[in-house]
């Protein structure tokens, strides 16, 4: 028996219901009725279009106020005035074990640590190769974590790339200067290029 057949059998067993569509329609009707009851309890009777329009306008005004900068300024002023009290209450709740307050305090008030500075218990000296060997030895001895060693090696690699690029630029500049001297008219002796 398929799922649809099972559902139809279950709804057919209830008196007055024959199909799944009828059951869904009844559920929607019940939800609308309970929503209407809740609105009426708040003093909002939305039976006529004029009442619906009035409530809609009131809701739009509330939304405008919430979105306005003056309202945000009022909120900011209220937080400045009562911020310490609110913070104290959050801390009390967090101490009592309320997870939401604790999470809020940690996530909002303490910045997330993306990375911590590497605490190197050694002084790196010598060439890049010697420094890489020192990092490898410190890792093997347990003085550095794998992440710290990786960070140091990446930094060392970056320094080496910059050093190499700088040396190449210097060599190219010197070569261009020598080439310019060789091509100058005074270098050929007679003022004519060969």
Image (cartoon, grey):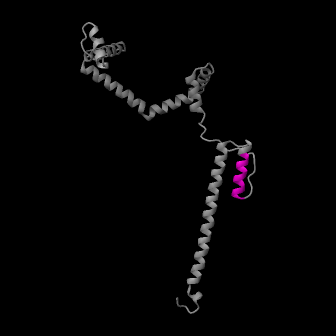
- The range drawn in magenta is 127-138
Q: Name the dominant secondary structure of the magenta segment.
A: helix
Residue 85 is situated, as x and y percent measured from the top left of the image, at 59, 24
Position of the N terminus, as image quadrant, is top left
Q: Is residue 55 visible?
A: yes
- Report which quarter residue 39 is drawn in: top left
Q: Is residue 29 left or right of residue 116?
A: left
Q: Is residue 112 magenta?
A: no
Q: Is residue 20 left or right of residue 125?
A: left
Residue 162 is situated, as x and y percent measured from the top left of the image, at 62, 60
Residue placed farthest to the front in the image? 1
Residue depicted at x 74% and y 43%:
141
Number of numbered markers: 0
Residue placed farthest to the bottom in the image? 190
Residue depicted at x 57% and y 79%:
179
- Report which quarter residue 142 is drawn in: top right
- Report which quarter residue 24 is drawn in: top left
Residue 178 is situated, as x and y percent measured from the top left of the image, at 60, 79
């Amino acid at each position: 028996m398929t799922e649809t057949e099972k559902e139809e059998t279950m709804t057919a067993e209830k008196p007055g219901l024959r199909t799944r569509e009828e059951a869904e329609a009844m559920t929607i009707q019940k939800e609308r009725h309970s929503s209407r009851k809740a609105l009426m309890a708040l003093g909002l009777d939305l039976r006529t279009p004029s009442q619906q329009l009035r409530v809609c306008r009131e809701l739009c005004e509330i939304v405008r106020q919430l979105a306005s900068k003056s309202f945000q300024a009022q909120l900011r002023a209220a937080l400045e005035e009562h911020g310490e009290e609110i913070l104290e209450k959050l801390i009390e709740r967090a101490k009592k074990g309320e997870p939401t307050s604790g999470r809020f305090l940690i996530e909002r008030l303490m910045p997330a640590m993306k990375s911590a500075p590497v605490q190197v218990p050694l002084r790196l000296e010598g060439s890049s190769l010697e420094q890489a060997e020192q990092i490898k030895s410190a890792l093997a001895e347990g003085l550095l974590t794998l992440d710290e060693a990786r960070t140091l090696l990446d930094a060392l690699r970056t320094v080496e790339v910059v050093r190499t690029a700088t040396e190449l630029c210097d060599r190219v500049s010197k070569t261009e200067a020598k080439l310019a001297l060789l091509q100058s008219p005074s270098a050929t002796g007679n003022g004519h290029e060969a």
